[in-house]
Image: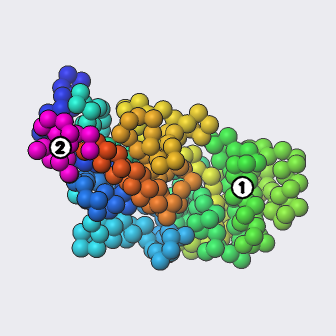
Amino acid sequence: MNRTTRCTGRPEGRGLWDAVGGGGAGLSAGMVLTRAPFTTAVVDGGQPRNEPANDMHGYLARDGMAPRKFLAVGKDKDARYCGTLARGTVVDACRSADGTFELELDNGELLRSRPLLVATGLHDGPPDIPGLRERWGPGVHHCPHCHDYEVRERAIAVVANPATATTESGSAHLAAPLRRYSDQVVFCLNGTEIGPAGRRRLEAYGVRTVDGPVVRVGPGRGPADAGPVTIELGTGATVVADAIFAAPRLVPRDRILTMLAAPPDPASGPVGVGSVDATEVRGVWAAGNVANPRAQVVTAAGAGSAAAIAMTAWLLGQELAAAIAPGGRTAGGASR
């Protein structure tokens, strides 16, 4: 929709939906809303955060499942009822004069919705080190709770990321818990500082710290997704590791929220949400990594479910109010 025709409240496209969501958390929300039952559309851009990973962990009964397979099962209409799936990416969003939201997809399709759940996730920006970015996901990880168990008793290197303004509470939070799984943990500071106290604490715990910039991650004796690999430092020294962990630069995919003027949390940075994942914009919810960068898949799914339950209450309130108005709406949003 262009700047002269946007937000007109026109009924073209797929009509008026009770809710529009997207992303992994959106599938869980879509299932809750469809069971409510509300007419639900799930907009999927096909770029999940964990796409580079071979498997995901921490999800009861789904541990070790490939992320792509997990989403495919969730989208299977024979196994799930998560609403109507719309392929595409939202390129424009605004509120119409009647209070509904208008969303334009990259294929030109227009969707209109009463409430809106944004579950668009985020993008991980790994350190810009030759050889490291190519291994992101299969061989280089960022979450100790997601992949630490799989690399237990192996040589582990943690590479700090200067782009994240890493401090002791940054990449060091990767090195310390990994020491519980291996007695061969090396923390490559890569030009960052953790302070004398932080260094003493890590080394007393059994984490070896190494100074100097990381200039390259060289090939090992196996494929790119398997160790060992050689980490080359600017000092000429090398570190050999079976697995690498690195703190990425987290970039929320929050363009929709920005267009709808949903304010970020001044403390955390991502969009601020309440106890039921509602933003400060009436009718807009946010769930999953777009609002909580630390959320695992199981956490994001739970947030999507909780947001959807709150949305059903919101929708019900809208319909109760409209039912007593002349020409109001009946259940499901249809006009009487």
Alpha carbon separation for disc pair 2 and 1: 52 Å
> What's the coloring here?
rainbow
Residue under numbered circle 1: 173
Q: At which x and y percent is residue 196?
A: 88, 47
The picture places residue 10, in percent across and down from the top left corner, at 14, 33
Residue sitting at x 79%, y 55%: 210
- Comparing 294 with 208, the one in front is 294
Identify the residue position indicated by label 2 in the image.
Answer: 329
Q: In which quarter of the view is residue 104 placed?
A: top left
Q: Position of residue 18 (x, y in %)?
A: 25, 48
Residue located 55% across and 70% down the image: 58
Q: Which residues are magenta?
A: 320-336
Residue 175 visible to the viewer:
yes
Question: Closer to the camera: disc 2 or disc 1?
Answer: 2
Answer with mark 2 or mark 1, whichever residue precedes in sequence.
Answer: 1
How crowded is the residue under tag 1: few (<14 C-alpha within 10 Å), some, or many (20+)?
some
Q: Is residue 335 magenta?
A: yes
Residue 333 on the magenta segment: yes
Going by the image, does 49 lie left or right of 116? right
